[in-house]
Image: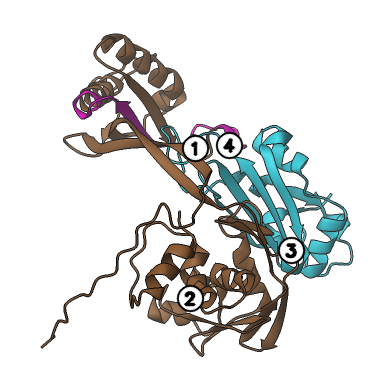
Chain colours: A cyan, B brown
Amino acid sequence: MTSVRLEDLCSVLRSKNAGPFLITLDMIFRDEQVYRVISEKKLITAELIAHMYGISVGDVVVLEQIDHLKAIKATIRRRVPSGSPGDPDCYGMNQEGPLLAVRFPGEVFAGAPAVRQG
Amino acid sequence: MMGVEPIIRALEQGADVVLAGRAVDAAVIAAYPIMRGFDRALALHMGDIMECGESALLDKAEVTKILTPNRVPVVGTIRDDHFTIRAGHPGMICTVESASAHSLYERDTHKQLELPGGILDKGTSRFTQADPRTVRVSGTQFHPRPFTVLLEGVQRIGYRTIGILGARNPRMIAQIDEILAHERRTAQARFEGVGRFDVYYHVYGKGAVLGAWEPVPHQAPHELGIVVDVVAETQGLARDIAEDLCLKIAFSRYAGRTTTAGNVGYLFSPNVIDVGEVYETTIYHQMAVEDPLELFDVHVQPIAEVNVG
């Protein structure tokens, strides 16, 4: 079965601190139709984010679909506050890694010609 | 973190240049239009989009490559019931997407922004393309609430010294977690009672960046970068422990070891670096204040004219 990587659907897939205790994950999609499929079928949920990061759903404090931007935003609690000893990423700029493993079955985008499958 | 009020106070007293302490990003731009009587919600939303300059724009002619980043101004124009954003360079444009996407940046939510004296609500904002280079924004709301100032505070918790080591020997790499844990335990025993300290390892090539969030199972890489990170109550103690620990790792007697002249590459000699004071966030709190100015002294002073050349 073919599958599609989240990363390949996004023009922006990034992480950044949102204050000292949160990291926010921005996913901006390239294609309107793809975004609509993902938002209408609710393919990206707080549960999915929690699963990918190995955290509890309660630690996903925001999950929003932003239609006019073709974007989904998730905000999660940091393991340690920004800059505290042991924090490997003071500004949270490289915490998108777990999202790179997100894949969707290709058939959900049937009819969205912009999606390359592989 | 101040809002618009202390900046307005300085402008009202005739300041040409305001040197402010930590301020809300949007307030730096919103202060002047609010002082002139424009709508608070629109002024703050305009400031919110403009505060990072060209990041609200789209580069159509590789302008940022030629000029280098952060050189292109963004021009905001406020009216009674809307504002517009346009690029300050003909090679760049402002689009609905580029102007509104900045609301995502470094915020937990795109819809609302908590500011001194209220919430900026962008949920009702309307973005339209006024012309190919200009975006028009209206409909933003500001919900006043009791005045607060975000209080951010840190506490010094010690001093840091680091050492940077490279591991290339496959037998060592296969056992690295046990080796590092063992040497941390022996350091804790050796320096017990001397002073308070903690040892952190950042093992690049083995989950250093994502830590517990790393989804990729660790396979043995052919090379590891190890940052030994010691935080202690004095700089001298941090340095002594880091030096000793790096040496112990370099000569750790792990199973199957053949590298009896040293197990790792030291990046530098001397092999440890004093990083200095270490701080931790201890306060992040919206503090209620009666008067928006009570925490901020505003002084206006003339600066002597300087003749150049």
Do discs 1 and 2 belong to a common subunit?
no
Mark 3 belongs to which amino acid? Gly
Mark 1 belongs to which amino acid? Pro
Among numbered discs 4 and 2, the one appearing first in the sequence: 2
Left or right of B103? Residue A38 is right
Q: Residue at x 33, y 74 (%)?
A: B17
Q: How many marks overall?
A: 4
- Mark 4 — residue? B214
**Label 4 packing within 10 angstroms: few (<14), some (14-19), many (20+):** some
Chain of the residue on which disc 1 is drawn: A
Q: Nearer the viewer, mark 3 or mark 4?
A: 3
Q: Please provide percent x and percent y for residue A14.
A: 59, 55
Q: Nearer the viewer, mark 1 or mark 2?
A: 2
Among numbered discs 3 and 4, the one appearing first in the sequence: 3
Rounded to the nearest angstrom, the CA distance separating label 3 from label 2 is 24 Å
Q: Is residue B251 visible?
A: yes
Q: Residue at x 10, y 88 (%)?
A: B309
| Magenta residues, start to end | B212-238
Rounded to the nearest angstrom, the CA distance separating label 4 from label 2 is 46 Å
The label number, if any, that marks residue B123 in the structure image: 3
- Mark 2 — residue? B32
Q: Nearer the viewer, mark 1 or mark 4?
A: 1
Q: Secondary structure at mark 2?
A: helix
**Label 1 packing within 10 angstroms: few (<14), some (14-19), many (20+):** many
Q: Residue at x 32, y 21 (%)?
A: B197
Rounded to the nearest angstrom, the CA distance separating label 1 from label 3 is 29 Å
